[in-house]
């Protein structure tokens, strides 16, 4: 198995994700090539005392962004933000300290 720190990248702390902690659902940004089994095992290793009940994953597509000036002859460059993957992890038991007290 890969290093859990390379699978789980960071917690997602939004109003919606923090509200779901009451139902034992925690949201993380994860590696794009990680599968549900690897994500569940990584969460259990990173946060001792937790048991994962289920993992739901979502691939978030990058958005198109336009950059450049507004002069008459200037062309606007078009780029994309990076695509990424997030996982919503439901726990059987235990808590994750990154979400406590929010």
Image: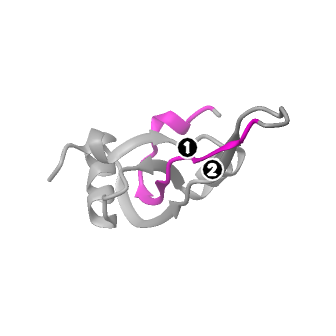
Q: Which residue is mark 2?
A: 17
* Local secondary structure at mark 2: helix
Q: Is residue 70 magenta?
A: no
Lower sequence index among marks 1 and 2: 1
Left or right: residue 14 compared with residue 59: right
**Is there CB contact under 8 Å for labels 1 and 2?**
yes
Q: Which mark is residue 12?
A: 1
**Nearer to me, 43 or 75:** 75
* Local secondary structure at mark 1: loop
Q: Position of residue 6 (x, y in %)?
A: 28, 42
State the scheme by which the image is colored. one colour
Q: Position of residue 21 (x, y in %)?
A: 59, 50
For mark 2, does the 10 Å Cα neighbourhood hold few (<14), some (14 to 19), or many (20 or more) residues? Answer: some
Q: Position of residue 28 (x, y in %)?
A: 47, 48
For mark 1, does the 10 Å Cα neighbourhood hold few (<14), some (14 to 19), or many (20 or more) residues? Answer: some
**Nearer to me, 72 or 53:** 72
Q: Residue at x 26, y 59 (%)?
A: 38
Q: Nearer the viewer, mark 1 or mark 2?
A: 1
**Nearer to me, 82 or 31:** 82
Left or right: residue 70 compared with residue 59: right
The residue sitting at the left extreme is 1
Q: Which segment did they paint magenta? A: 74-101
């Amino acid at each position: 198995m890969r290093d859990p720190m390379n699978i789980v990248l960071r917690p997602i702390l939004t109003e919606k994700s923090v509200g779901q902690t009451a139902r034992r659902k925690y949201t993380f940004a994860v590696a794009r090539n990680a599968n549900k089994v690897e994500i569940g095992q990584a969460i259990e290793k990173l946060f001792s005392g937790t048991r994962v009940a289920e993992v739901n994953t979502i691939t978030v597509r990058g958005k198109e962004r336009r950059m450049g000036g507004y002069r008459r002859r200037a062309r606007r460059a078009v780029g994309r933000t990076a695509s990424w993957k997030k996982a919503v992890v439901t726990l059987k038991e235990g808590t994750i300290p990154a979400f406590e007290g929010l």
